[in-house]
Amino acid sequence: DTVMTQSPASLAVSLGERATINCKSSQSIIDRSDNKNYLAWYQQKPGQPPKLLIYWASTRESGVPDRFSGSGSGTDFTLTISSPQAEDVAVYYCQQYYSTPVTFGQGTKVEIK
Amino acid sequence: EVQLVQSGAEVKKPGESLKISCKGSGYSFTSYWIGWVRQMPGKGLEWMGIIYPGDSDTRYSPSFQGQVTISADKSISTAYLQWSSLKASDTAMYYCASHGSSSSLHYFDYWGQGTLVTVSS
């Protein structure tokens, strides 16, 4: 299985302070035939199902605020929240869909100071 | 609007069987993969497996192969996850989720609300 490792496990940021979440895969998840990274990011708020934020490592899902951005390639990826708002308090997960089984990172909890 | 509506919470005893459901609407049910994701209490997300209702092509994570059965009834646009003999360790929230890619491996655009399964003697 491809192991997805997120860091940090949790972070507390002030309103407006940039938040950065890292995700590392145990093997490359880029398909050289189409140069796409098979990496998605989800947001899960308490008591809710996950919500898709980012796919193909950097494509924002429709309706997702532009303060959320994804970057990276190969094995190292980052989700950035440029200016976190109170409603961004949640757990964030990365997911690889390059190989079976699909695997998720263990999650990063974001809190506001 | 794509919607996935899951069956309600269940409380079962160890050894009992269970089948939970996920009804799709607002899209062509036979053209989207539907997967199941487990979330144990306070833990992360685990991909269990996925089915393509159009031809019942089903894939399982090795961790869940033989432990659960995924099926679908396209006549009523409903996917299922079932256990023949529950264990306490099956206590979790179970989400169905779907995508419209031709590949079984894809991100999930749409999610059900979740079904909480509690297994306790």
Image (tube, rainbow, N blue to C red):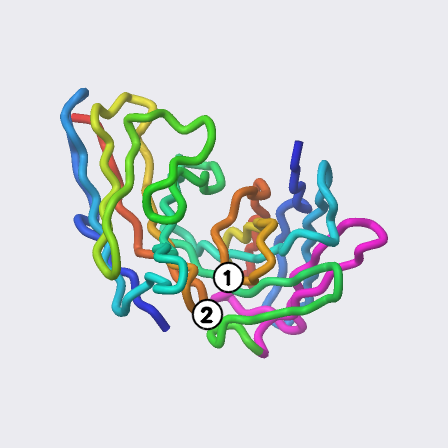
Is A13 a magenta residue?
no
Residue wearing tag 2: A100
Count of numbered tags? 2
Badge 1 element: loop
In the picture as drawn, the residue positioned furthest to the front comes out as A33
Contact check, label 2 and label 1, Cβ < 8 Å: yes
Residue at position x 65%, y 61% from top? Answer: B81
Q: Amino acid at mark 1?
A: Leu
| Dot 2 alpha-carbon crowd within 10 angstroms: few under 14, some 14 to 19, many 20 or more | some
Which of these two is toward me, B73 or B17?
B73
Query: Which residue is denoted by mark 1 in the rendering?
Result: B105
Task: Please state which of residues A5 and B69 is positioned toward the viewer in this rendering.
Answer: A5
Q: Nearer the viewer, residue B39 or A37?
A: A37
Secondary structure type for disc 2: loop
Quadrant for residue A98, please give it. Answer: bottom left
The image shows residue B105 at horizontal and vertical percentages of: 50, 61
Disc 2 to disc 1, C-alpha distance: 7 Å
A18 displayed left or right of B91: left
Magenta highlight range? B66-90
User: Which quadrant would residue B13 be assigned to in this image?
Assistant: bottom right
- The residue depicted at 31 percent of the width and 56 percent of the height is A105
Label 1 Cα neighbours within 10 Å, binned few <14 / some 14-19 / many ≥20: some
Determine if residue A54 is in view.
yes
What residue is rendered at 68% in x and 55% in y? B20
Q: Give the residue displayed 21% in from the left and 23% down from the top.
A: A83
B94 shown above or below B66: above
- Above or below, B33 against A33 in this view is above
